Amino acid sequence: MNEPGLEKAMDTLQYLSQDSDARRLYEARHKYLHDEASMMESAKLAGIKEVAKNMLALNLDITTIAKATGLTEQEINTLRK
């Protein structure tokens, strides 16, 4: 085990497996971080869709909007409705 990161991970795993309270806290933090990342991704997508709606209001063509936002043409057509 010459990898410092792997060694630290193994030490952490051993510590957490011995202490149920520490394991519970670790799992709660992991869930929080996962939920936070999901929330940020949802907010990002909502923002992109709002930009696409604004671009539609400016009568830009769907191909341009798709290139600018990364949304598919089908997603943009759905926003139009």
Image: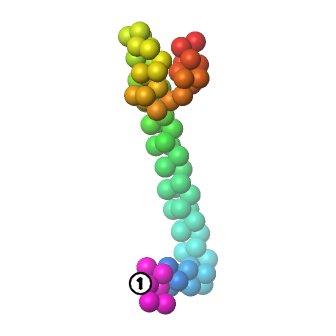
User: In the image, which residues are magenta?
Assistant: 1-8
Name the foreground residue: 8 vs 67: 67
What is the magenta segment's predominant secondary structure? helix
Residue at 54% across, 68% down: 25
- Label 1 crowding class (10 Å Cα cut-off): few <14, some 14-19, many 20+? few
> Considering only vertical position in the picture, is 10 above or below 78?
below
Q: Position of residue 39 (x, y in %)?
A: 50, 43
What residue occupies the far front of the structure in this picture? 63
Q: Which residue is mark 1?
A: 4
Can the viewer see residue 54 in this picture? no
**Residue 5 shown in magenta:** yes
Q: Secondary structure at mark 1?
A: helix
**Which of the colour schemes (rainbow, by chain, secondary structure, one colour) is used?**
rainbow
Q: Is residue 18 highlighted in magenta?
A: no
Q: Residue at x 53, y 83 (%)?
A: 10
Q: Which residue sits at x=43%, y=22%?
A: 65
Identify the amino acid type marked 1: Pro
Q: Is residue 15 above or below residue 77?
A: below
Q: Residue at x 53, y 54 (%)?
A: 34
Viewer-proximal residue, 48 or 23? 48
Q: In which image quadrant can residue 24 be found?
A: bottom right
Can you name the residue that lies furthest to the bottom here?
Answer: 1
Number of marks drawn: 1
In this orientation, does residue 28 appear? yes
